[in-house]
Amino acid sequence: MTAVEIQQIRRKLPEWVAASVPFAEGGKVASYIPELAGAPHDALGITLINADGDLITEGSCGRRFTVQSISKLFTLILALMDIGEDRVFEKVGMEPTGDNFNSVLKLELVRPGIPFNPLINAGAITVSALIRGSDPEEKTERILQFMRALANNDHLRVDLDVYRSEADTGNLNRSIAYLLKQNKVLDGDVEEVLDVYFRHCSIAVDCADLARMGLVLACNGTDPLTGKSLIPRRYVQIAKTFMTTCGMYNASGEFAIQVGLPAKSGVSGGILSLVPGRYGIGVYGPALNNKGNSQAGVHLLEIMSRELNWSMF
Amino acid sequence: MTAVEIQQIRRKLPEWVAASVPFAEGGKVASYIPELAGAPHDALGITLINADGDLITEGSCGRRFTVQSISKLFTLILALMDIGEDRVFEKVGMEPTGDNFNSVLKLELVRPGIPFNPLINAGAITVSALIRGSDPEEKTERILQFMRALANNDHLRVDLDVYRSEADTGNLNRSIAYLLKQNKVLDGDVEEVLDVYFRHCSIAVDCADLARMGLVLACNGTDPLTGKSLIPRRYVQIAKTFMTTCGMYNASGEFAIQVGLPAKSGVSGGILSLVPGRYGIGVYGPALNNKGNSQAGVHLLEIMSRELNWSMF
Amino acid sequence: MTAVEIQQIRRKLPEWVAASVPFAEGGKVASYIPELAGAPHDALGITLINADGDLITEGSCGRRFTVQSISKLFTLILALMDIGEDRVFEKVGMEPTGDNFNSVLKLELVRPGIPFNPLINAGAITVSALIRGSDPEEKTERILQFMRALANNDHLRVDLDVYRSEADTGNLNRSIAYLLKQNKVLDGDVEEVLDVYFRHCSIAVDCADLARMGLVLACNGTDPLTGKSLIPRRYVQIAKTFMTTCGMYNASGEFAIQVGLPAKSGVSGGILSLVPGRYGIGVYGPALNNKGNSQAGVHLLEIMSRELNWSMF
Amino acid sequence: MTAVEIQQIRRKLPEWVAASVPFAEGGKVASYIPELAGAPHDALGITLINADGDLITEGSCGRRFTVQSISKLFTLILALMDIGEDRVFEKVGMEPTGDNFNSVLKLELVRPGIPFNPLINAGAITVSALIRGSDPEEKTERILQFMRALANNDHLRVDLDVYRSEADTGNLNRSIAYLLKQNKVLDGDVEEVLDVYFRHCSIAVDCADLARMGLVLACNGTDPLTGKSLIPRRYVQIAKTFMTTCGMYNASGEFAIQVGLPAKSGVSGGILSLVPGRYGIGVYGPALNNKGNSQAGVHLLEIMSRELNWSMF
């Protein structure tokens, strides 16, 4: 059946991508830093990879882009691997917020003021502080090594221009971080924590990298192409659950209804998704909808899920 | 494998229930109406039924209780069957809120002021107005018939004492309903809509009824024991997705992490859950945690999901 | 000095009114009911009366309009006279909210959920329930008699068309009232309380009526022209304080800085203001700014306060 | 009359202070830094000074304490003198918030995200950035010189221990400041602005200093004892208006009803108040109520206002 499906995907994907590209029109490329603002508005690319190593790619997949919020997934997993469930969930909750990903409301309104989940900015900043390492460089290096292993790509690196722009303009994240420090959620030096955060958000990837990382999650933590066991099963489960309930910012509920797959998006226009047990998927489409997700990318995944009956539900 | 699992469940369930009962201690039975306040604090019962008709029951399953919020699931499905996806989702969104199930905040703060999802009170009231029927009696009768068909139980009926108490004390729901009317989300007479709402929340069931209804959802809309097709596949998918993202009030995220099954709870202490393709599950445990879910019931489902590896994720 | 000032006002007022009329342009006439929507967009009138009975009138003062929120002032005073400070302030607070006058946020967010002050809708609805009287008619009649005495005008009456339209469209106020009932702030039948509220908001006045009522407040509760003592000094003090801190909705702070006089506005475009010890002032200008106050009317009062050095501060 | 009143005050003040001291019991001394936590819980002192130089002092007036939020008044006035009304009110509004003085809610919820008024933390931080000076030292020095002139006391200085503790623990203020920077309200280096803010909050005074500064405001900007004109009339008016609408945090409305005088409090337990044209008043009582104002101090001012008929309203 998989072989049949792959043929179907190969045959239909150009048409599905073509049908999705026009949806970029209503979206907006993130413009708060010049490195993102320069992305091509109507680009759309997708790469799928399965456990047999079949790789399908369509559209503008050549371009590299920074992972942005997609890294929140991997810092979460690494923190779980570093210090375990109990200690991570003392500092960060498990609930969707219904608010924007960079909102401070619930940090003030809902006691004890810990972030609702690890995929909003407040949660991801908190998680960044939990990564083992003696200084920001070591922490960042460990995150980078982890993502390289998952992507099976030793060339992943931090885009330093993006990193510097993020650090320069990241005042809302600074505000969130100091509020977390006030709430006794964040220990240590705020600028050091943010440094780790800005760096891992600035790791550059392409669609194939995302697809390969997604494949490891789809296969419960083992890279089926190398046989390496990279993540304990339980932490993959946690990650996939958060991807389903919180992965697409405050449009996660709609994505679950319309696509029904675990996914994590970033404001660069990237989406890492997966079909459990079968595919890792990387999407790139920089024009964002008003929730911060790739407009054309989400549309493409909606078509594919509907046509291929991919929803988990 | 299923037969083996059923044997395991039969053997272990008494122990799991016994281990969960003490968790009722920290919870509180809903007390806003006398009919709920009288429930036994430390009761805990569970019924499972599978596609072969194997039925497992343990603990205090004899008691009948009102469905309360669990009916929100069936009014949603019936509204989808009555008027289709497009018209339902004009009036109600698809997102978890992060707020209490009876909050009015987002109705004021987030334009255009439609309920975030159909499983919070605002959403369920809105959906109640979408059910076909010339008057509240006919609408309620249609909901009741639908639930009777799903439970394969013609004896389901509205508990009139509970209904009258709900109607008498339901001022927060009235407040929500008038705010919805102000926001042009709710058409028609508010008290008539609320009458439907209070009635369907007051339908009395037992664990076996919930389990049987859950089984239909687990089997994608067809009752495997009668062969009757009761709900179109797509609407089951929508329902299961909402159960996963919003079914346990603002503890849905944690439930997804710790249990990983679609579920819907009510303040009477009932939980309807399911293992896709395999089991319908009804739980009853009236002592609630601070999010409004059965304290012992959630604990029991956590044990079972962990021991039996039931998480969808 | 007063005589000199009156001459100055008579001489300059036409010019000040003319300078203020253009400010109506940016405003919007309230349009939620037809009776308000029909008001002339660029009308602006003002009447001043002093303790000697000198009356100055300029602009479009002939028109009658409903008091709307201005009545909140008189129901507050009447409730204080009926049941005293202690019992009134058990039910309603003394703080500005910073939110819109019809907001429900703080009723949910700030325990114990009593209205922050008597001049927002929630507070005025609460106060309406405190007025003595065996039924809505008697309560309304008592409010009407009180306002007739203050205006020295037996012809004040409820505009029944406006009342009916308010009652028909007042769903946000219904929502607020049921939330108050839920919070145990409001006793009794919600629709009966709202009936009183909608009726007293619909009492029709003209600028001269407002000015005369303002004069009584300016003279600490005694009508200087009849010598009648109508309000105890302390309750006038309370009323004038609320007018200063909360009288102009959530633009009260700015009004205090720019005008510095006690005032209360209504969405019909009326403003009742006063210069302590000296003048009662009635203004009418139906085009409202985005906070719900008469755009041209506020501008006119700003000019007069600045030119005549009227600020209390 | 003034002479008679002064005699009355001298005669009755010991009794009024004694009657107010017990109210300290229910309050709490601010404890977020050791320098504040060490204040004597049941201390209560008051100093009044009038335009003739009559000075009345009662209770524990010997102690020095830091001005904390009271300095917000003087930075506002100095900013007005430095750059004028128009430029100040581009950056900060004129409205009470109804929220805690250190809330971030409205900075996120209410566009364009400028602070509602200059007496909440967000507003005072914003204003601190508007003070002229080439660096934090010069700005602080100018504020200090201004307060010295108003207090007629060249010995006022920054308490460096308090300043360092404030700077060490001020993460909520850092959070607010970075949110302001994000909202483009705050220009320049955040830590430099906060340095000015923490320093001026740490200026040490005693009751007599506060009373003398209050006297200048009571006399419209001129020190009646030296004849020096220190503040333009209009800026005193602005300051007194803000003191009335926003000076006692989110208990300003109640203070206006119960006392009716312009006042500004600080979490050290100080209150600067005034009777327009007549007295400057300094109060010290470190046990705070739940809104952050001196519990016994507010009670003392309530007695005095009632007994001496001091309310402006």
Image: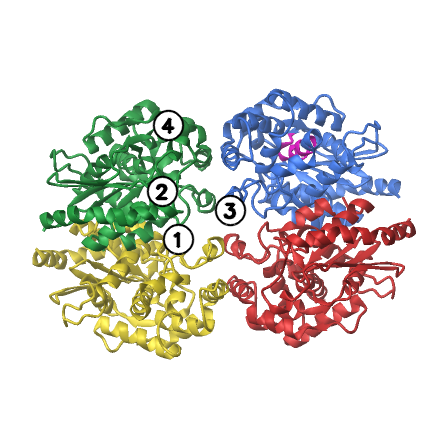
Chain colours: A green, B yellow, C red, D blue
Whether tag 2 and tag 3 are in contact, CB under 8 A, the answer is: no
Nearer to the camera, D138 or A251: A251
- Image point (43%, 59%), residue name: B114
Q: What element carries label 4?
A: helix
The amino acid on which the numbered mark 4 sits, given as a three-letter code, is Tyr
Q: Which of A293 and A214 is in front in this view?
A: A293
Q: Give the range drawn in magenta.
A: D66-78
Q: Distance between the residues labelled 2 and 3?
A: 26 Å
Residue receiving disc 3:
D109
Q: Are marks 4 and 3 in contact (CB under 8 Å)?
A: no
For badge 3, the amino acid type reads: Leu
Mark 2 to mark 1: distance in Å?
A: 26 Å
- Depth check, mark 2 against mark 1: the one in front is 2
Same-chain status of marks 1 and 3: no
Question: Badge 2 is on which residue?
Answer: A287
Q: Distance between the residues labelled 1 and 4?
A: 32 Å
Identify the residue at horizontal 15%, vertical 55% (top origin).
B12
Q: Given this view, does label 4 or label 3 mark the residue nearer the observer?
A: 4
Q: Position of residue A285 (x, y in %)?
A: 31, 41
Q: Quadrant of residue C29?
A: bottom right
| Amino acid carrying mark 1 in the image | Thr
Q: Is residue A150 above or below residue A238?
A: above
Which numbered dot is residue A163?
4
Residue A281 in the figure: left or right of residue A165: left
Give the answer, above or below, for where C127 lies relative to A104: below
Front position among marks 2 and 3: 2
Please report, as a chain letter, where disc 4 is located.
Answer: A
Residue B137 magenta-highlighted: no
The reply to whether the C-beta atoms of the residues labelled 2 and 1 are less than 8 Å apart is no
- Chain at numbered mark 3: D
Q: Is mark 3 on a helix, strand or loop?
A: helix
Mark sitting on residue B97: 1
